Amino acid sequence: LSAQPSEAELQAALAPNRSLDLSGSSGNAGVVENGQLKLTGKPEAGGSWAGMAVPGMAAAGSTFQLELTPMQLQDTLHAMVQNTAGKTGRLCVLFRPNGVAYAQIANAKDQWREASLGVYQAGTTYVLEFVTNATGGTLYLYAKGASRAQGYSYTVSGEYEWTQLQLQFATNRA
């Protein structure tokens, strides 16, 4: 793939023989049913966080693509690529129950920030792509059947020291 792969390059690279195997996903945020990860956000006394990690690690320069359908969210849902070794590194989409999606990053200096991407519709399936490089990445969020240009994107440059990347999810259970 090129440094900034096109939608067509991603589709070719992520053909069915390269789909994610969710069967070994671990964590307490949901279950895998019929090849789909179903995350559950539910209020808990005192509040807590629940997470899920997709098996396997990837190197900087990897691309992750998935379909996600936010349903009746009671609290924030996180879908992210996270550095699992070395310095902090997170590129994340937050789906808030108010119908607004945000980009969230945590960089190698352990600095955190969020930026509003825009509104999303509960029950709509979205394509979420994380395109990484050694020190940054871009996330794309768009409705299934639409193009990247019709959705949202957020780019981070020069803020990460990616080593091992993993696709992770978290739900707030406040």
Image (tube, rainbow, N blue to C red):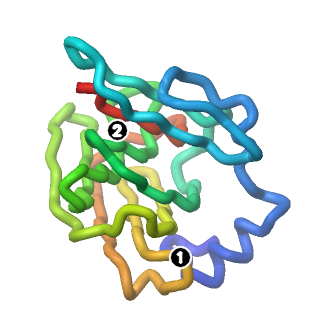
Secondary structure at badge 2 equals: loop
Locate residue 33, reporting x and y percent.
Answer: 71, 40
Can you tell which mark lies on residue 144? 1
Q: Position of residue 30 (x, y in %)?
A: 54, 31
Query: Does 39 appear above or below 5?
Result: above
3D distance between C-alphas at marks 1 and 2: 27 Å
Most extreme residue toward the right, as rendered?
A: 17
In the rendered structure, the answer to whether residue 5 lies left or right of residue 105 reads right
Which amino acid is tagged 1? Lys
Q: Is residue 73 left or right of residue 118?
A: right
Which residue does the image show at 15% across and 37% down from the upper left? 111
* Residue 117, visible in the rendered structure: yes
Q: Is residue 174 above or below residue 136?
A: above
Which quadrant of the structure image shows residue 158? bottom left
When asked about the image quadrant of residue 122, the answer is bottom left
In the displayed structure, does residue 98 sit left or right of residue 131? left
Q: Quadrant of the N terminus?
A: bottom right
Judged from the image, the secondary structure of the residue bearing numbered disc 1 is loop
Q: Nearer the viewer, residue 121 or 16?
A: 121
Which kind of residue does numbered mark 2 sit on?
Gly
Using the image, determine if residue 147 lies above or below residue 133: below
Q: Position of residue 54 (x, y in %)?
A: 61, 36
Residue, disc 2: 89
Q: Residue at x 23, y 18 (%)?
A: 47
